[in-house]
Amino acid sequence: METKKFTMQFIKDKWAKRPLIISGPCSAESEEQVIQTAIQLAETGVVDIFRAGIWKPRTRPGTFEGVGIRGLPWLQKARKISGLPVTVEVASAKQVEDAIQFEVDVLWIGARSAVNPLSVQDIANALKGTDVPVLIKNPLNPDIELWMGAVERIVKAGVKNIGLIHRGFSTFGNTEYRNAPMWHMAIEMKRRNPHLMMICDPSHICGRRDILQELSQKAIDLDFDGLMIESHIDPDKALSDAKQQITPQQLKKLIDSIKWRHESTSENSFNLALEKLREQINQIDDELMQLLSQRMKIADMIGEYKRNNNITILQPTRWNEILEKAGIKGKLLGLSEEFIQKYFDAVHIESINHQNKVMNS
Ligand code: PEP
Ligand code: MN
């Protein structure tokens, strides 16, 4: 492969590309694995930036925590050989300095750092006076102000090229996803920061490879500006996140299968904008249904409890309390009193029906 000259303009051109495709292993594991993955990804022709984690902030100790600084020369080599700019996750000022010293082109702040303003500030301090682009993942918990705060700290450090990565949110218990997408969080973040690009990380949302394509398409339908997808030359043998990684060839197939809706120029812009908004509404409606179903499952459990303890289904004082609070909250959220009343009545009736069934089963 030909060696490319990495001018700042080259990086900026890649950075400005829509959709921007970032791919590479969850973790750099060996020089061979890093270089081979980068070469194969460059050969697909669909990847703009090569990613690899060097310092891995893992939730539990005792798992693979990354190769550390000795992986940076591997990335530098992969960058030269493949011609792809590279990005790594940084979690401290020292890591920012080390990464920049080894010519890392783009930095990203992970979900476990984004939750901690002290970590983000430490990173921001080291970024002052540099012109390296920075991607900021959403924090683990669905707190939009925390995500905004991380962006503000990086903006204040003088960083010009900032992007956001939606990687889903931690939830308790087993769900279809490793991290709940909660699309409305990303949509609201985009609404607040229309000038920042929003990339989706389907790998960490899904946690498994079989639903990556579907989720990626959803993100593109919601007008995301790019995708960050983990890939590995031998995914099943990956030292971290093995279940969600795919080969460079599978990545190419996935990217080729995506319908890039915003590229179709035959439709007029009004129709396109409308379609995107409707897709957002569909997503939110889908999430509301899932939440309602969860709520009814809890009602079933309460029904069982009441049955076993011989307690009545209806407790008017409790229900009045709920209604009163909902009315006040609804007003604050811009929802009419009439709507809140109707909505809660409907939910209440359904809940009573569920409990009734359990009581009499
Ligand atoms: C990663 O990208 O490998 C990673 C650790 O992601 P996150 O911070 O989203 O968990
Ligand atoms: Mn990972």
Image (cartoon, rainbow, N blue to C red):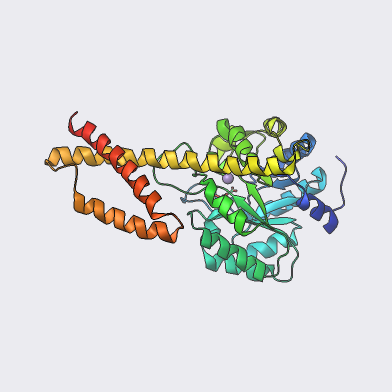
- Residue at left 60%, top 38%? 218
- Residue at left 22%, top 52%? 318
Whether residue 345 is visible here, answered yes or no, is: yes
Horizontal side of 223 relative to 138 (left or right) equals: right
Horizontal side of 361 relative to 76 (left or right) equals: left
Location of residue 204 in the rendering, given as x and y in whole percent from the top left corner: 56, 43
Horizontal side of 256 relative to 235 (left or right) equals: right
> Is the residue 193 above or below the residue 206 in the image?
below
Q: Nearer the viewer, residue 255 or 329?
A: 329
Q: Quadrant of the N terminus?
A: top right
Q: Nearer the viewer, residue 182 or 285?
A: 285
- Residue at left 62%, top 41%? 219
Q: Quadrant of the C terminus?
A: top left
Residue 267 sits in which quadrant? top right
- Residue at left 52%, top 62%? 145
Residue 313 sits in which quadrant? top left
Location of residue 21 in the rendering, given as x and y in whole percent from the top left corner: 71, 43
Location of residue 58 in the rendering, given as x and y in whole percent from the top left corner: 51, 51
Farthest-out residue, left: 310
